[in-house]
Amino acid sequence: MHPDNTGHAERTAVTIRSAFLPHNDPDASLAFYRDLLGFEIRDDLAYDGQRWLTVAPPDSTVTIVLEPPAAQIGVTTAERDMIAEMMAKGTYAALVLTADDLDTVHARLLAGGAELVHAPLDPPHGPRCCAFRDPAGNLIRIDQR
């Protein structure tokens, strides 16, 4: 960055393009993100017996890449085992979404068989929210917009 005439560094706009979450069952992930949350499938790529899925809410420029955890470069076998263990416990990854109508989304996810973490509540420290786990165990918190 170069200083501007005030001595401050010029700022370049930075945005989020993609976030990555692990998955261990691409078909179950598609059912959760596409069918229950209503996300679009932007890419469904297969290579060497593994699949990467890119999903996003309609009209969003930010995507979520659902990747097989074994595909991460430089991860040892012991680390892969630890990732699998953490995914099974639901402690590896999380995502926060927002919804205009939290109760409707909550009901839709429950009806679709998603694993409930907590029903809608009004915490003293943030927005009204509920939480589920996706099929890989990732924590999906949904805040009322």
Image (cartoon, rainbow, N blue to C red):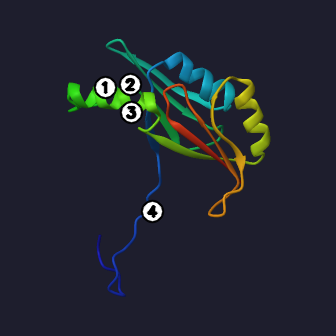
Residue under circle 2? 68
Q: Amino acid at mark 4?
A: Ala
Rounded to the nearest whole Å, what is the CA distance between mark 3 and mark 2? 14 Å
- Report, in whole angstroms, how far the alpha carbon at label 2 lies from the one at label 1: 6 Å
Residue 71: assigned label: 1
Q: Nearer the viewer, mark 2 or mark 4?
A: 2
Residue 120 position in % (x across, y down): 72, 46
Whole-angstrom CA distance, mark 4 to mark 3, is 35 Å
Which quadrant of the figure has residue 116? top right
**Marks 3 and 1, how far apart in space?**
16 Å
Few, some or many C-alpha atoms within 10 Å of disc 1 (few <14, some 14-19, many ≥20)?
some
Question: In the image, what residue occupies the spot 78% across and 45% down?
Answer: 101
- Nearer to us of marks 3 and 2 is 3
Which structural element holds mark 4?
loop
What amino acid does circle 1 point to? Ala
Labelled pair 3, 2 in contact (Cβ < 8 Å) = no
Q: Nearer the viewer, residue 68 or 57?
A: 68
Measured from the top left, where is residue 71 in percent x and y? 31, 25
Q: Residue furthest top?
A: 49
Q: Nearer the viewer, mark 4 or mark 3?
A: 3
Placement of the N terminus among the 4 image quadrants:
bottom left
Q: Earlier in the sequence, mark 1 or mark 4?
A: 4
Badge 2 vs badge 1, beta-carbon distance below 8 Å:
yes
Q: Residue 89: which quarter of the image?
A: top left
Dot 2 or dot 4, earlier in sequence:
4
- Residue at which label 3 appears: 86
Is 83 above or below relative to 102? above
Mark 1 in CB contact with mark 4 (< 8 angstroms): no
Amino acid bearing label 2:
Pro
**Which comes sooner in the sequence, label 4 or label 3?**
4
Q: Earlier in the sequence, mark 3 or mark 2?
A: 2
